[in-house]
Structure formats: C-alpha cells, structure tokens
Image: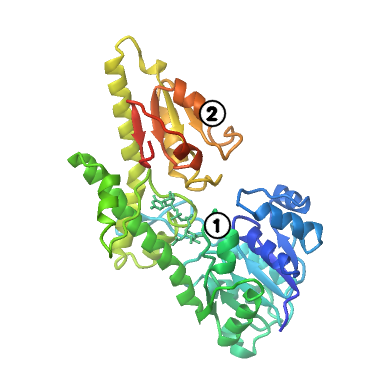
Amino acid sequence: MSFNHISVIGLGYIGLPTAAMFASRKKHVIGVDVNQHAVDTINKGEIHIVEPELDIIVHAAVTEGYLKATTTPEPADAFLIAVPTPFKNSEGEQNGINIPEPDLTYIQKASQAIASVLKPGDLVILESTSPVGATEQMADWLAESRPDLTFPQNAGEKSDIRIAHCPERVLPGHVVRELVENDRVIGGMTPKCSQAAIELYKTFVEGECVTTNARTAEMAKLTENSCRDVQIAFANELSLICDELDIDVWELISLANRHPRINILQPGPGVGGHCIAVDPWFIVSKTPEQAKIIHTARQVNDGKPSWVIDKVKLEIANFLQDNPTKTAQDIVVACYGLAFKPDIDDLRESPALNITKALSNMHAGSVWAVEPNIASVENVLSTVELTSLENAQENADIHLVLVDHSQFKASKFNTKYLVDTKGIW
Ligand code: SAJ
C-alpha cells in the first residue's frame, strides 16, 4: 500500500503541523478547512497559528508544491481527521451534577464531507481526541453516506475502507519535534487497519507505532490527559493549603521533589487549553459513578480562577487601605499573560484570559493585559488595554502574574501588590 496523496481535514494546531510533516517527506498533501482565512494564509506559504519552526516547514512545503489548502475535500489515499471535539452547549445532568457532554458535530461534518470522495482502498484516521466509541460512530456515519462501499464494522478485514483512531499526543510549543519523536498509539478497527495506519505514520514518525484497538486508543489518550489533570490538581490544592498555612508552595514543592520518587507539578491560575481541561470530562460523562478522582481533579482545577480573583480583590483592598485618598476607579490592575500556557498565542480555555475578563467586568478602574504573543485583544477583551511589560510594571498598581512567559521570567520585578500564580517574581 502506498500513500502518495494524503488529505488532512482540519488545519489547526494539530492538522496543519501534521499536513506539513507529510509534505516535508514529499507526499502530496491536501489540507481541508472550513476557515477561508486559514486556507488563504496557508496557500500563501504562511501560517495562522504560532508554533515554533512550523512557518519554515509550511513555507517550503507550499513553495515546492507538496501542500495546498482548500475548503472542499478532494480524493486522496488517506484522510486524517483533526477537527475540534468541544462540549455541547447545554451540559448533561447526571444525579443532579452538571457534567459537560462531548460534541462530535465536527467529526460528523468532516466524515460526511470526505464520504463523497472515498474510494476502495482508502484509509480514514481519526486523530481528534475523542470519547470512547467515537471512531465506531465515525465509521457508521461514513457507512451511512456511502452504502456502495464496505467498512470494517460490517466487512471486517475485507472492507473497502480502513479505519483507525490514532490520537495526537504532541505538546503545543514542541509540536514539530514531538510529531517525529513521540511513540504513536495506533487503534485500528481491525489489524489490517492498524497496519495501514502504521505504514502511513512511518512516513515521518521515528517513535514506535504501538497497535491496539480503536476503543483502547481513545481511552489511552483520555487517560494521559486525565493523569496530568489529576497531578496538576494536586499542585493546585497544595497552593491553597500552603496559602492557609503561610508556607511558600514553590519552595515546598522543590523540597518535596528532591525525594527520588516524587515529582509534583506546578500550581497555576487553573488548567487551560483544549486538551487537559476538556478530555477528562469525556471519561466522567461516560462513567460518572467510577470516575471520582478524575471528576474531583476537574473541579479543583476549575475552582482555581475564582480563588485567584479573590486574591486580587484582597490586594485591591490592601492598596486602598494604604492609599486612603484613592478610590477603586484610580487603581490599574495589570494581568501578565493571557495564553493558556507559556510562550504560545493559544487562548483556548485559557484561565488567564477568563480571569482577566472577569476582573475587567468587576473592577471599577482599568485592567491592562501584557501578552507578548498576541498583537490585538479587541475581539476577545473589548474593555482591556494591551500594554507593554515595561509600562505595566512601571505604572500599574496591582500586578497579577497569570502565565510564566519567558519575557516575564527574564525580567525581575518586585512590588508590594502582587498576586503571582506562577511563582516567577
Ligand atoms: N499546567 C500547570 N502546571 C503544570 C503543567 C501544566 O498548571 O505543572 C497547566 C498549563 O499552564 C496549561 C495546562 O496545564 O494551562 C495544560 O498544559 P500542558 O502543558 O500540561 O498540556 P497541553 O494542554 O499543552 O498538552 C497536553 C499534553 N498532554 C500531556 O502532557 C499528558 C500533550 O502531550 C497532548 O498532546 C495535548 O495535551 C493534547 O493535544 O491533548
């Protein structure tokens, strides 16, 4: 089997780098996205996201003619679906507790879009992080749209179309390296489906491709991110405990981590991104009775932003007490960082952004944001002024560190009115 024409559906943080890696190995790649701006930007050899090294690879791939983007699918030998899997708008209620339910609409739309161009022998891979059973569901949607073709759920190894779930596991900010080096979990709906997927990924993956079934592959990805969420919740809970007991949590963690078998993660303003703050719910919503620690970790991490906001309110009160001639309207609060983690521009599910938004809604004075990775915040934060690090440090009254961007870590800063959720100043 040879895959010379590969189609990637969804040209976001995962789809675009993956498309670019195939193209860099001289495969003809058609990237498909509903966002015309993204398509136009890529076809100019440019990128619409921030990810180190990606711009150079995309530019070369487009210039050499191996990568092109379009809004409608075209025939290919393999299709990779890398579209978002958000929550449904209305949360599901189980036993009186609101549990967010996964929304598979984007996967459904992507499978319906590619169905018309499928031909016998094609491979379809679901890369989007998905609840257990989503790959089987996708296979059913494909089969409904193409009754003239056979699929693994009915025809087994003899099927016209091969289907697998191969979850992406790359870390934003290190995507180009991790795409090549990380091991891949390959969950074929049949062993032949897995073999086909391995052959495809071996185009650029140097890590090991380990096979399993689709459901286990789905659960493996959810397990990895839930494990990290639970570990971060432990660090966040420690930060609350230490605050009560007047202990420096950063010192505490660095001391505990000197134990040879302890490796505590770092507290922060909460957990963001479209992965760790989302994926554990895919387990909780399927098995709420069993997923107790995973559920609690989500609640601990989701509760951290309001704790941070309370800390800022306390600093505002302290400032007013120290400066009796001033009113809340005179006070400028500077929020350092809006992205969901350091050195990226990604605002998805960002606690930093949500905290800044909440402060700008409740504070009578000005709220400034410092975000070196973003040029404008007008669309997301209409009442917040974007300013430079220097101006904020010099002229703001209350300082709130939300992200440990390298620019912030490089600048030493000392002030009385500081809430430092990342322990950098
Ligand atoms: N965070 C902390 N403390 C820490 C580490 C992280 O508060 O010690 C916060 C970050 O600030 C951020 C959030 O957690 O808000 C998530 O950041 P992250 O760096 O842990 O992970 P992501 O979301 O960028 O990427 C994760 C990765 N999964 C794991 O490390 C298990 C990545 O490998 C996955 O591919 C990615 O999710 C994904 O796409 O699912």
Question: Gap between marks 1 and 2, in whole Å?
Answer: 26 Å
The percent coordinates of residue 51 (x first, y second) are: 60, 52
Kindly give the residue lying farthest to the bottom in the view shown.
158
**Residue that label 1 marks:** 174
Q: Could you tell me if residue 83 is visible in this image?
A: no
**Residue that label 2 marks:** 388
Residue 110's place in the image compared with 347, above or below, is below
Three-letter residue code for mark 2: Ser
Considering the image in quadrants, where does the N terminus appear? bottom right
> Of the residues under marks 1 and 2, which one precedes in the sequence?
1
What is the number of the mark on residue 268? none
- Relative depth, front residue between 107 and 317: 317
Q: Is residue 315 left or right of residue 113?
A: left
Question: Ligand 1 is located in which of the four quadrants?
Answer: bottom left
Residue 347's place in the image compared with 15, above or below, is above
Residue 142's place in the image compared with 343, above or below, is below
Kindly give the residue lying farthest to the top in the view shown.
325
In the rendered structure, are the residues bearing label 1 and label 2 in contact, judged by CB atoms less than 8 Å apart?
no
Q: Residue at image x 25%, y 55%? A: 256
Which structural element holds mark 1? loop
Q: Is residue 390 left or right of residue 5?
A: left
